[in-house]
Amino acid sequence: MLAQSGNDMNGSATGLGERQTSLVDLRTVPLPDFQADNKALAGKPMMTVKRFCMEMQRRFPHGSNDLSLLMTELGVAFKCIRSFLRDAPNAEFSTLLEFANTQMHASLAASGLCCMIFSSQYKATMPIEEGSDQGNYIVVFNPLTGATGGTLGTIFSVYSRKSSAGSSGDSSDLLSRTGYEQVAAGYCIYASYTALVLSMGYGTHIFLLDSISGHFVISQQHVKIPKTGPVYSINTAQLSNANEPIRKFVAECDEESSGKFYRYEDNVVANFHRVLTSGGVMMKAGPSGEDLATFLGMAAPLAYIARQAGGRASVGKRPVLELNSWNLDMAVPLYIGSADEVSRIEELFGETKNEILVDPEHHLRVE
């Protein structure tokens, strides 16, 4: 004889009914509550990047929705680039780069939100579409990083204009601007998934591209880089040319007792995204050439994202965001990620900085 459930013979049924020896003994079968099931399936509406940015802007009544609209336009550009990359998996990188650059320009030029568009890859300003309004934002973008067959990425940065409203932007809108003057920054990573990571000055947030709806949907609000982490990323082919403090730091990481492991891809977006989500440090140590980070198109926006996530970014002796660009193709060393690792690198350079860190845990969440 089967054991009785927790209900006695006279008690109320909690499952399908009361049972002793066979299905014949089932006395009541509760009807399904279809209304409750529908409510459970419905849940909360999707938090798309457009809705999220709009909700964020409402918290600052003095602000404008234009920045939210600009983030939406960028999201459209990223989806178009993702589609092209998927349809042309064997294309030359130069072809992919040219398409990404053209698509970013097309989306921004017709938005009516920009007064200047600058492609850091091509080191050139790009024209605003004739007949479009002159907006109040300057957008800098690196159209595509990485290599064919691997993870790819696009980086962007946004500044408010300093030149007179209603006209095209000029050199004062980009030159001599510190990293702190950015009003938004982010990147899109194209891998087995597509993720948009952005900050509008109030935390760093991750959105995943939903393949069914075609929208970027919030995945994680107020990302926090761990204070210390296991990942270190550097191009070891250039390590012999790096400064002594960096070689010493990498030697410390290589020690078995350090608990750290090495990860490196030929894509700064992929390397930084791993550090952002797992903790650790990414290094572009130079001393020259491609192993430095362009300030406007790479170092400044990634440093902005890292700081909003509670991390740090340094050139070895100064925080990246303190710098300003004296020319449009200025390049700098970049050490970015967890606060402890970046501080250790500065210590090896003979510098100690008491930089005020952002704590994402104290930010309000958008529901």
Image: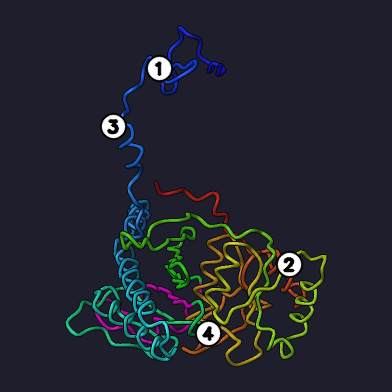
Name which residue lies at 42% across and 20% down.
23
Q: CA distance from mark 3 to mark 2?
A: 51 Å
Q: Which residue is mark 3?
A: 35
Q: Is residue 358 above or below residue 253?
A: above
Name which residue lies at 41% across and 49% down.
366
Q: Are marks 4 and 2 in contact (CB under 8 Å)?
A: no
Location of residue 217 in the rendering, given as x and y in whole percent from the top left corner: 38, 58
Q: CA distance from mark 4 to mark 2?
A: 27 Å
Name which residue lies at 57% across and 62% down.
277
The stretch of residues the image draws in magenta is: 152-179
The image quarter containing residue 173 is bottom left
Please give the label number shown on residue 260.
Answer: 2
SS at badge 2: loop
SS at badge 3: helix
Please give the label number shown on residue 24.
Answer: 1
Q: Residues within 10 Å of mark 1 (few under 14, many from 20)?
A: few
Q: Which residue is mark 4?
A: 294
- Work out whether mark 1 precedes mark 2 in sequence or the reverse, and give the earlier one: 1
Q: Nearer the viewer, residue 189 or 22?
A: 22
Colouring style: rainbow
Tell me the kind of residue under disc 2. Answer: Lys
The image quarter containing residue 246 is bottom right
Q: Nearer the viewer, mark 3 or mark 1?
A: 1
Q: Is residue 70 left or right of residue 331?
A: left
Tell me the kind of residue under disc 1. Answer: Val
Q: Residues within 10 Å of mark 4 (few under 14, many from 20)?
A: many
Location of residue 317 in the rendering, given as x and y in whole percent from the top left corner: 68, 77
Q: Is residue 274 left or right of residue 170?
A: right
Q: Residues within 10 Å of mark 2 (few under 14, many from 20)?
A: some
Q: Magenta includes 165?
A: yes
